[in-house]
């Protein structure tokens, strides 16, 4: 009996070992991975809910509001000095956190997750990520004019990074775990299971491979269940009455609305980048310490909020008012301008948060203003003007995120209105088509381009930056090493490349010089004299590049 039991235990252990080996080697192609995806989705979903609850708790504490959903209405009743002081104090706290716990004084968000998926096997920096989550929590709770989706996505990425590192999985599995975590977090945050799954595929992984689809959907469903158990099956926004498009005469108006929203999205993104550059210049000229930059931004935000309290927080109250038509034309226009400025100041102050919720608000206000004008000029062929607010909300957000599919669906899921699909799709398509030509595809990819990370052009552009020369070169003891005398002559002529450089630097030099190989050196001593380390062969560099392209194509089409 004991021998039979021992035999069964050994068989079970062997099966677990084989399953573990399959997970390590085959990853997402195996059914076992779906259970891992479910667990990751549950963890990310709870993290998103806890983050949202933490914002509500601190916001209630510092502002004393009984309902964070009506923060700006309540803030209008508070003393002016309190509205001015709270964002500034929040900025001081954020500044101290980024100063002591991040290497570059920058809060992490969605762009860093996109970079981690493309260049770091689906991993992100967890230490800086924890500090960034704390910064975003304080920023959103004290009146910062950003959204919660950016930090939620990065928190989810930290969870998947921990799991990936614990299991020691490869890059394909790590990226799919990342997609699962992000999908669950977005779904749990917005009660949007379809959009959550597609956001992870469209924005984070930037492909729709079948091997990733099933586990990401499983994780997204888990996040949605967690949201509904917590908040119930309710939509974020409630639209009044019915919204019906007056086909077909009204469709040109939505084409035009899409172009207007595309321009507004571009202005918003460029305002953020201009404000960030201006803030950096001011900081350097005044020799301002990093920790003071968020405090100054918070003080400016507080001053604006005295007159325009609607800029505070994620802005869902104002977005709801726009969707229900509870704003006049001049209010919609002025609120749009002020909100763009507030978002730019918050982001330039390195205070943390995301751009999705602000883009929803800006889009709803833009659409409402357009709707007021369109229905006033052509009342006989127009539907209700609030429909333009709905379409504008999706159009601006899609252009900012560079995600027309997931944004269209998240608008439907946030509002529960699936009857106006054509109007929203027309506006979204026009806005993204226009904006993608005026910026580098999206806000996130433009952010990365400004850091000299070129993902927008595709893997053929960024894969070269993943290979260090020292990892591809042939050392002097290699059987087919280059002739050392020839290498030294090339060094004397100034033709060499440093070992720390990447193939992104090396291949253009091969094209320009026409040589078959190039000396690889390190600079030594005070005079920076080159010390020979080996040789980089043109053919080796091309082989490494081709292998990476083949692996990427296999992942994206499997």
Image (spheres, rainbow, N blue to C red):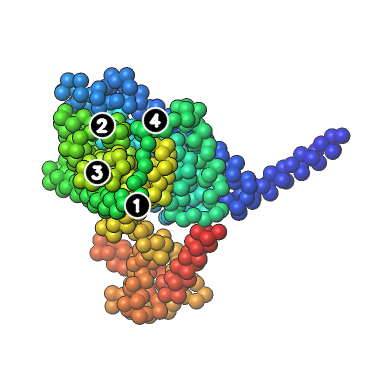
Tell me if residue 547 comes above or below residue 432 in the rendering: below
Circle nearer the viewer, 1 or 4? 1
SS class, disc 4: helix
Q: CA distance from mark 4 to mark 2?
A: 27 Å
Say which residue appears at 52% left-offset and 33% top-offset. 225
Q: CA distance from mark 2 to mark 1?
A: 27 Å
Which residue does the numbered mark 1 point to in the structure image?
248
Instruction: Report x, y in % for residue 406.
Output: 42, 47
Residue 296 visible within the image: no
| Viewer-side residue, 365 vs 278 | 365
Say which residue appears at 68% left-offset and 49% top-offset. 18
Nearer the N terminus, badge 4 or badge 2? 4
Tell me if residue 108 comes above or below residue 26 in the rendering: above
Q: In the shown orientation, is residue 307 left or right of residue 395?
A: left
Q: In the shown orientation, is residue 302 left or right of residue 442?
A: left
Q: CA distance from mark 3 to mark 4?
A: 42 Å
Quarter of the picture holding the C terminus: bottom right
Q: CA distance from mark 1 to mark 4?
A: 42 Å
Which residue does the numbered mark 4 point to in the structure image?
52
SS class, disc 2: loop
Which residue does the numbered mark 3 point to in the structure image?
379
Q: CA distance from mark 3 to mark 1?
A: 15 Å
Instruction: Report x, y in % for residue 42.
Output: 52, 35
């Amino acid at each position: 009996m004991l021998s039979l039991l021992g035999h069964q235990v050994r068989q079970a252990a062997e099966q677990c070992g084989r399953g573990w080996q399959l997970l390590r080697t085959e990853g997402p192609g195996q059914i076992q991975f779906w259970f891992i995806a479910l667990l990751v989705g549950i963890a990310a979903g709870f993290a998103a809910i806890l983050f949202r609850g933490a914002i509500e708790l601190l916001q209630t504490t510092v502002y004393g509001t009984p309902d964070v959903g009506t923060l700006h209405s309540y803030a209008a009743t508070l003393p002016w000095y309190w509205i001015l002081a709270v964002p500034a104090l929040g900025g001081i706290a954020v500044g101290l956190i980024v100063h002591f716990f991040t290497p570059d004084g920058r809060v992490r968000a969605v762009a860093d997750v996109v970079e981690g998926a493309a260049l770091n096997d689906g991993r992100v920096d967890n230490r800086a990520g924890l500090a960034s989550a704390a910064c975003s929590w304080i920023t959103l709770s004290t009146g910062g004019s950003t959204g919660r989706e950016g930090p939620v996505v990065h928190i989810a990425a930290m969870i998947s990074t921990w799991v990936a590192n614990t299991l020691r999985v490869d890059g394909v599995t790590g990226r799919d775990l990342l997609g699962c975590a992000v999908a669950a977090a977005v779904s749990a945050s917005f009660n949007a299971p379809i959009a959550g799954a597609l956001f992870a595929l469209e924005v984070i992984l930037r492909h729709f491979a079948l091997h990733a689809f099933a586990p990401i959907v499983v994780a997204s469903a888990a996040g949605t269940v967690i949201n509904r158990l917590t908040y119930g099956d309710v939509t974020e926004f409630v639209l009044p009455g019915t919204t019906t498009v007056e086909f077909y005469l009204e469709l040109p108006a939505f084409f035009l609305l899409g172009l207007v929203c595309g321009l507004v999205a571009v202005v918003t993104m460029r305002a953020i980048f201009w404000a960030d550059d201006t803030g950096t210049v001011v900081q350097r000229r005044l020799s301002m310490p990093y920790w003071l930059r968020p405090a100054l931004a918070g003080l400016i935000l507080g001053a604006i909020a005295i007159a325009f309290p609607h800029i505070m927080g994620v802005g869902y109250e104002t977005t709801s008012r726009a969707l229900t038509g509870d704003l006049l034309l001049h209010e919609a226009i002025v609120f749009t301008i002020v909100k763009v400025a507030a978002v730019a100041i918050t982001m330039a102050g390195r205070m943390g948060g995301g751009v999705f919720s602000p883009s929803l608000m800006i889009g709803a206000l833009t659409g409402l203003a357009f709707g007021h004008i369109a229905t006033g000029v052509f009342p006989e062929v127009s539907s209700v003007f609030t429909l333009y607010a709905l379409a504008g909300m999706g159009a601006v957000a899609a252009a900012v995120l560079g995600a027309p599919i997931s944004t269209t669906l998240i608008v439907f899921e946030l509002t529960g209105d699936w009857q106006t699909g054509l109007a929203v799709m027309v506006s979204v398509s026009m806005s993204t088509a226009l904006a993608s030509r005026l910026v580098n595809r999206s806000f996130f990819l433009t952010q990365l381009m400004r850091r000299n990370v070129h993902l927008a052009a595709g893997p053929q552009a960024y894969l070269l930056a993943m290979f260090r020369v020292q990892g591809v070169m042939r050392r002097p003891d290699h059987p087919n090493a280059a002739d050392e005398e020839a290498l030294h002559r090339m060094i004397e002529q100034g033709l060499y490349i440093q070992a720390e450089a990447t193939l992104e630097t090396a291949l253009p030099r091969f094209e320009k010089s026409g040589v078959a190989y190039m000396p690889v050196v390190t600079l030594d001593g005070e005079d920076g004299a080159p010390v020979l380390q080996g040789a980089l062969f043109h053919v080796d560099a091309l082989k490494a590049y081709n292998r990476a392209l083949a692996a990427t194509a296999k992942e994206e089409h499997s």
